Image: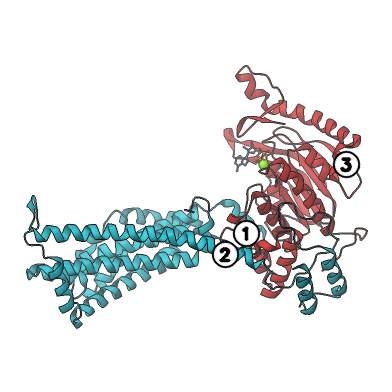
Chain colours: A red, B cyan
Amino acid sequence: MTVIDADTEVRKGFIDVRSMGVTFGSGDSAVVAVKDVSLNVQPGEFVSLIGPSGCGKSTLLSIVAGFVKPTSGEAVLDGKPITRPGSDRGVVFQQYSLFPWLSVRKNVEFGLKMAGENQNKRNITARSLLDLAGLLSFENHYPDQLSGGMKQRIGIVRALATSPQVLLMDEPFGALDTQTRVVMQEILTNIWQQFRISVLFITHDIEESIFLSDRIYVMTARPGRIKAEIKVPLPRPRKAEMTDSPEFMNLVQELKGLIREESLAAMAPELKDRGLSGFGMKVGPKGVGEIF
Amino acid sequence: MGSMARVNIAAVPIPGVDADAGRVVESMVASAPEPASHETPELTKPATIEPVAPEPEIVPIVSLRDVAQGLLKHITRERMITAVLACVSIGTLFLIWYLGTKYRFEFYIRFKNVPTPAEVFQQAMQVGLSNKFVYNIAMSVRRILTGFAIAIAIGVPLGLMIGRYARVRDLFMPVTEILRPIPAIAWVPMSIMLWPNNEAAIVFITFIGAFFPILLNTIHGVHSLDGVLIRAGRCLGANEPQLFWNVILPGSLPHIFTGLAVGMGVAWVSLIAAEMISGQYGVGYFTWEAYSLVDYPAIMLGMITIGVLGLACSGIIRMVGVLLMPWLAFASGSKR
Ligand SMILES: Nc1ncnc2c1ncn2[C@@H]1O[C@H](COP(=O)(O)OP(=O)(O)OP(=O)(O)O)[C@@H](O)[C@H]1O
Ligand SMILES: [Mg+2]
């Protein structure tokens, strides 16, 4: 329906996070999750946030989504401070978050129903979006009948149904296998190209962040701060073959270097206690074992 | 198939589609029919959101029918085995009863006074069709339905509120924890004192029996609801009432129905006890009266009636559950 030309200037969807800090708990048990983070997402820009486990990425996203209030600083969307969740910000979660009691189409219609749209309009929008995700023929299935990749695709178009200005994604492909992940990344760039909305994308996959983003923020180990900001000058539309280009490889190397330091820092205190040394392993809340 | 779909869409005026209609049809033509496997859809689509008319997909009918037939065959065979086993199960019970009464089995358990199936059948033919007996059944059913309906009307909303709001929980849980261990039967004397008439007292006892299982399972349903679904609902723009109605209630529904099934069982137990102690009319009263009149076949008839009524009630609940929650057939961990 709406054909958005890539050259058209997009003005809405400016996320501005200003010197934000988040502390959970108080007293002895206080955990400083995020400390003095400033970042922004320009309208229509695709920005990734990458960092070691437990550095506060999800916390940051929850604040922009409006689930959590910052201890200091603020998050602002198009000049308005964010205080609560709203349909102007679509969120795609790491866990599957489709409503199991609704059919695929009703899931996509959910946001429009909450907004009071009539059945006809909802139906048309949902079917268009499902077609875009390549899942129209599954419209009457229930989420439990679908594969993980399908569920996440529906999660993405469901978040887009209310025409939000920004899309917030917290490791949306984290639970998928590598093959599906690569396909999902292409689908996502494809969808983003059409909607041209601002995206804040969290990942711990370096290749993924480069392939998708215009800009990447690297966070330090907890308490999370911004360690580096890296521009991705690769042309668009991005193609799977680009991942073999020297430009891409260089970016991967650069990011790997930045992140390894932080991963080591993240686990150093815990490993020291046990007389272990790091081999590029990271210690997260889930324990030792994930390798960057 | 593809060409048919195209013709359909071009012919039907699509409401809500703006000036781009021409372009829309073009792009429909350009994009080939849906790929068979949807795991890897077409990646290079034109930069247009294609409007799709709200009409059913054209599906390959032949293969679908084959699949359905195969499935049907499978199910009927499964069902036949199930039915045979059910007959064996119930038949054994009758056989024991028949043999026990025929040979007047007596070793610790005494079948001496137990009526034979034939006697009970005769009794059912005589009494069972009498107005009095039907009236007894009607009374019991009315009491159950009333008590149960009130238990749902109070238990489900209260359970949802307690599950959702810590303050409501803090207010209601202490009193719930105290009252819950008291079995409904223990309420009989109190209930007779409390209520103006017998009828209200019995309904109240039935209500008590059904209420706590429904309440506690509803609370549990809200608590076990995945938090990410509530967050998803909120960031899709749902306000608190909408969240309640569209996320929390359907999300707790499976647990609510567990509560209803358990509650129905307890309600029958409570009802029969109440009718035996304080009742006028009702199946429980009928059974107890038969005992005091030494009418043995009538005792058996009463028992069988209670069993059948209880079965029917839980069957109805299960059926309503299946109708209201079709998605559960596909949920992980469900039998399939
Ligand atoms: N509600 C909470 N209460 C207390 N501490 C919390 C809470 N939420 C998060 N934290 C802590 O804040 C820190 C940051 O958590 P967060 O989930 O944002 O990390 P993350 O970067 O998303 O990690 P991962 O990559 O493993 O998802 C962690 O140390 C975590 O234990
Ligand atoms: Mg996280």
Q: Do labels 3 and 1 share a chain?
A: no
For ligand 1, tell me if the residue under mark 2 lies within 8 Å.
no
Q: Which residue is rendered at x = 33% and y = 59% of the image?
A: B84
Q: Which residue is rendered at x = 74% and y = 62% of the image?
A: A131
Q: Which residue is rendered at x = 29% and y = 74% of the image?
A: B141
Mark 3, other Cα within 10 Å: few <14 / some 14–19 / many ≥20: some
- The kind of residue tagged 1 is Gly
The image shows residue B161 at horizontal and vertical percentages of 48, 60
Q: Are marks 2 and 1 on the same chain?
A: yes
Q: Which residue is labeled 2 in the image?
A: B246
Q: How far apart, in angstroms, are the residues tagged by discs 2 and 3?
A: 42 Å
- Asked which secondary structure carries label 1, the reply is helix
Quadrant of the rendered structure where residue A242 is? top right
Circle 2/circle 1 CB separation < 8 Å? yes
Circle 3/circle 1 CB separation < 8 Å? no
The single residue placed furthest to the right in the displayed view is A7
> The N terminus of chain A is located in which quarter?
bottom right
Quadrant of the rendered structure where residue B149 is? bottom left
- The kind of residue tagged 2 is Asn
Q: Which residue is labeled 1 in the image?
A: B233
